[in-house]
Amino acid sequence: MLSRKIITLILLIGISFGQSTMNGYGYGMFSHNNDSSSLGSGSIGLLPTFQNNVSLSNPSTWHNMPFTFLSLSFEGQNNSFDNQSFSNSNLSSAKFIIPAKQKLSIGITFSPFLSRQLTVSDTTYQTFVFSETDTLQYSRSNETSGGSSMMQFAVGYNLNDKDDVAVAVDVLFGSSRSVKNLIIDNTDHLLQSRDYFTGSLLGLYYTTKRFSYKEKPLILALNYNFSLNPVDVRNESYQAFIDINSNNYHDSIDYPTASQALTPTDNTFTDEIKINNLKIGLDYEVYDSYHLQFEFDQWNNKGNNNLLSSIYPGYIKGKNRFNISLSKFSKYSANNAFEKINFRSGIFFGNYDIKSTGLEKLSDVSEVGLALGFGVRFGLTNNQLDLSYNFIQRDNIYKVGVENIQAFNVGISIGDLWFVKRREI
């Protein structure tokens, strides 16, 4: 068995999903929030961060938008551990939101749901001795890539001047790839498999201004997400082969050739991922346009997790997160440039409940983070450019220990006049 001292983790550069050593747990790292305005305050996305009374991740607030918005967020991330540093970039979310007459809103969102982009590799070759003159040099690597994506359709409605509700349906789709490689005397022996994800979630949202403190509204926001159809995973496992030309692809040069290979085994694992997620948020205006916000997120995966195709011998069973943020919102009627800027800042703390699937007991992972960001309005339809920065430190990661993450996010939101009650500015 390989010594832990000769094992290292290598993060590969990608353009589809963010990367982290956390991607080695279970089916990968779950994505909880993706828009730039929320990331600028370290928010879980429940309370307003995009504009006053508006969160891009809470559809019960969308009717407060003055215009229809198309919003895109792009993220660049740098991960460092054990004197190593790796970077990647990706499109983190795309949203199209239509408010109608300050009463109803509908929207569609595309974003990652989980990411598995990670490689675990031996740092040195090991020697297996048959005799004094007959030895083999070998090493191993385990690579996963891809993951599941999410398409959300949401409808929000303003019940009265104090209460807002929304319903969202998330459809999950996509696939991931796993490659196990035994390298013997510089020859690759590959065992490949693919996982295909299908499932759906239902989200319920409620935002109210019924409470107050010192004659100022105390906004309470609630969100409960649960699996409408728990995620099933269909696994295709292919016959192992010797990759003679070292192109990581099974073709006619390899042994056995692609035409001679056995048909892949096909198994479906039902109810592998089953989500329950409760979010609670409080927003209070401490001073004119300055808002102090508190949010709590409790997330649990009650799925079967029977496939055991992960790199690490365990998966993320649950997560708790608490964040405090302070935001200064711009005003729609502002004339000077400073008053058109949203400022955001926050700190957050989290803990990941790690469930072991092997004999080795895995430790829970803790995290602490700092967030900074701002948004600038421009144009007649309140277009907005959002920039955010997160610094996150995670501890107790399997075989890694401490990982530091720096994430930069840029969001662009373009407004239009669709379904505005009066088609004038």
Image: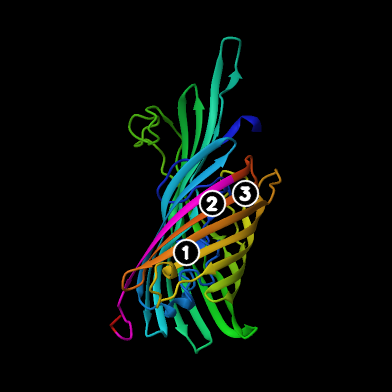
Q: Which mark is residue 359?
A: none
Which residue is under mark 1?
A: 37
Q: Earlier in the sequence, mark 3 or mark 1?
A: 1
Q: Report the residue that reaches farthest toward the front.
A: 336
Give the label, 2 or 1, closer to the camera.
1
Give me the residue at 50% from left, 28% from top: 183
Q: Position of residue 173 (x, y in %)?
A: 43, 60
Quadrant position of the N terminus in the picture: top right
Q: Quadrant of the C terminus?
A: bottom left
Within 10 angstroms of label 3, few (less than 14), some, or many (20 or more) residues? many
Is residue 1 visible from the viewing direction of this image? Answer: no
Q: Is residue 421 left or right of residue 58?
A: left
Q: Which mark is residue 394?
A: 3
Quadrant of the rendered structure where residue 305 is?
bottom right
Mark 2 secondary-structure assignment? loop
Residue identified by numbered label 2: 28
Q: Is residue 308 left or right of residue 36?
A: right
Query: Residue drawn at (44%, 64%), measured in percent from left and top?
Result: 375
Spatial separation of the CA atoms under disc 3 and disc 1: 23 Å
Where does the image place residue 228, in percent across and percent down from the top left?
Answer: 52, 71
Does the magenta-highlighted stretch encompass residue 27? no
Looking at the picture, tell me which residue is in the foreground, 288 or 187.
Answer: 288
Label 3 amino acid? Arg
Q: How is the image coloured?
A: rainbow
User: Which callout, 2 or 1, points at the residue further toward the start of the chain?
Assistant: 2
Amino acid type at circle 1 is Ser
- The prevailing secondary structure element of the residues shown in magenta is strand
Please report the residue visible at 28 percent of the width from the left and 83 percent of the height from the top. Answer: 423
Nearest to the eye among marks 2 and 3: give it: 3
The magenta-colored residue range is: 404-422
